Image (cartoon, rainbow, N blue to C red):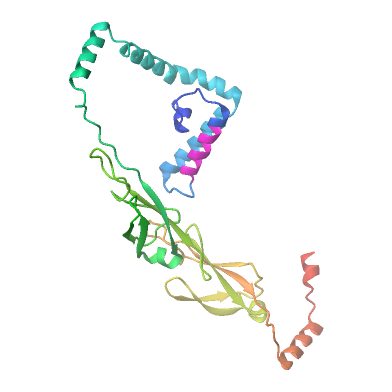
Amino acid sequence: MIFKDYYKILGLETNKVNIEQIKNAFREQAKKYHPDVNNGKVAEERFKDINEAYRVLSNSASRRKYDRIWYSHVGKRIDKQKQQQEREARPDLLTLLWGSFQSFKKKGQAKKEPVKGENVETEITLSIEQAFYGVDKKISLRAVDGKMKTFSVKVPAGIRNGEKMRLIGQGKAGSNGGKNGDLLIKIKIENSKKYRLHGYDLYTDLYLTPWEAALGTRVTIETIEDTTNLYVPQGMQSGEKIRIPKKGYKDGKGGRGDLIAEIKIVVPKKLSEEEIELYKKLQEITKFEPRKEIL
């Protein structure tokens, strides 16, 4: 059986943690590797391991049983490393004296280690059309010195909602010769009046008159890139959906999601005298009773 270090999977370095620390670690890792945020088999397997680890460690009985296995695989090695570190941390008198002498001799000459600057995170909002086709965006951020700095960002076509772009070296300055941090730009795709994005599918509303819905019709519907003819079968109801394959959002693998037209039946607010008469005639002859149909 392959041993899995559940503590390490949850980002914990030791088993000396309480249940609240386990819960917090689980929430952090689950959010980081959730399938809605990450694509690919690796992220999917990691998400399964995270759930498996939490299921075992959140139960006191299964955790005690697992801890015995964990100690034989991991805990013993950690204890040995600590013992070695403690031995190395207790130098003899000669070493102490020599170290003090060297420290005094080289006082003021110690070289500081380079430290990389902190990353900076920001967010930009795109329309569905901008994200679909790609766009050049300019963003302005206030630097540490208070001055505004403008960055040009080329957003690639088909970028995912929540995806992050990285501008190398555009974060906070490093110290002691260390590299600058990076600028991380999170993409937020905003729904429009025409389209709504769900995964790789695009949703749009298709408005029909009562007679179009009852009799069926052919309509021309706008997709994100062109128009297409759509057959609406008779008897359609508000809320029903018609799927148009491969007319949705880009899936990042050369394919497309679907465009889904959601039916909205619209009743005219104003009627001519002739239309009123026709509706009255329909009311007299019809045997359709929607409230009984539903019941």
- Which image quadrant for residue 292? bottom right
Check the image and report above or below for 78 versus 262: above
Identity of the residue furthest to the bottom in this view? 274
Q: Nearer the viewer, residue 75 or 124?
A: 124
Query: Percent position (x, y) of residue 16?
Result: 50, 22
As drawn, 88 above or below 240 = above
The quarter in which the C terminus is drawn is bottom right
- Who's the residue at 29% across and 10% down the image? 91
Q: Is residue 174 left or right of residue 18?
A: left
Residue 203 seen in render? yes
Q: Residue visible at 75% across and 89% down?
A: 276
Residue at 55% from the left image edge and 20% from the top image edge: 65
Q: Would residue 32 be counted in the magenta stretch?
A: yes
Residue 281 x, y percent position in the rendering: 78, 87
Which SS does the magenta portion mostly show?
Answer: helix
Q: Is residue 258 magenta?
A: no
Q: Is residue 227 above or below residue 120?
A: below
Which image quadrant: the N terminus? top left
Front residue (pair 80, 56): 80
Question: Magenta residues?
Answer: 22-34
Q: Position of residue 68 (x, y in %)?
A: 51, 17
Query: Total marks drawn?
Result: 0
Judge left or right: residue 293 versus residue 127: right
Extreme residue toward the top, this view: 93
- Give the left or right position of residue 101, taking residue 23 as reference: left
Query: In the shown orientation, is residue 235 left or right of residue 258?
Result: right
Residue 30: x and y, percent? Answer: 50, 41
